[in-house]
Image (cartoon, rainbow, N blue to C red):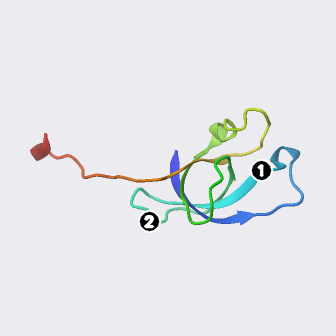
């Protein structure tokens, strides 16, 4: 899973039938410190995420798993909306 931020949406009137009714969102991948990384990607969405939300997403074969009743041709899917992100502090020998 990877972190990302929803930065937009895609509207398409002509598409594969498996994508009918699916939301397509533009996601900008982010690092754990929330700085931007890589290029934006188009993801299907099974969570109802909105613009600006911090989400986590999967790619590859796992991207089709949330859509068990349909054959959705997706290689990237938003699978969760982040409510809180706690990075904590790295442990050192002093804290052991």
Q: Position of residue 73 (x, y in %)?
A: 77, 43
Q: Position of residue 87 (x, y in %)?
A: 33, 52
Q: Residues within 10 Å of mark 1 (few under 14, many from 20)?
A: some
Q: Mark 2 points at which residue?
A: 35
Q: Mark 1 points at which residue?
A: 22
Circle 1 SS class: loop
Query: Residue at image x 77%, y 41%?
Result: 72
- Mark whose residue sits in front, 2 or 1: 1
- In the rendered image, which quarter contains the C terminus? top left
Left or right of residue 49, residue 95 in this image? left
Query: Residue at image x 64%, y 48%?
Result: 47
Say which of 51 and 71 sits in front: 51
Q: Position of residue 70 (x, y in %)?
A: 79, 36
Q: Position of residue 52 (x, y in %)?
A: 57, 66
Circle 2 SS class: loop
Query: Residue at image x 89%, y 57%?
Result: 14
Left or right of residue 68, residue 33 in this image? left
Residue 8 position (above or below residue 90): below
* The quadrant where residue 7 appears: bottom right
Q: Which residue lies furthest to the left in this view?
A: 94
Distance, label 2 to label 1, CA atoms, is 28 Å
Q: How crowded is mark 2: few (under 14 residues within 10 Å), some or many (20 or more)?
A: few
* The quadrant where residue 12 appears: bottom right
Q: Earlier in the sequence, mark 2 or mark 1?
A: 1
């Amino acid at each position: 899973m990877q972190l990302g931020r929803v930065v937009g949406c895609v509207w398409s009137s002509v598409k594969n039938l498996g994508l009918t009714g699916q939301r397509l969102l533009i996601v900008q991948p982010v690092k754990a410190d929330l700085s931007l990384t890589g290029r934006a990607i188009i993801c299907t969405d099974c969570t109802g995420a909105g613009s600006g939300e911090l989400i986590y997403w999967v790619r590859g074969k796992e991207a089709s798993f949330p859509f068990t009743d349909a054959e959705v041709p997706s290689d990237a899917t938003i699978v969760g909306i982040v409510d809180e992100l706690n990075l904590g502090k790295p442990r050192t020998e002093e804290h052991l």
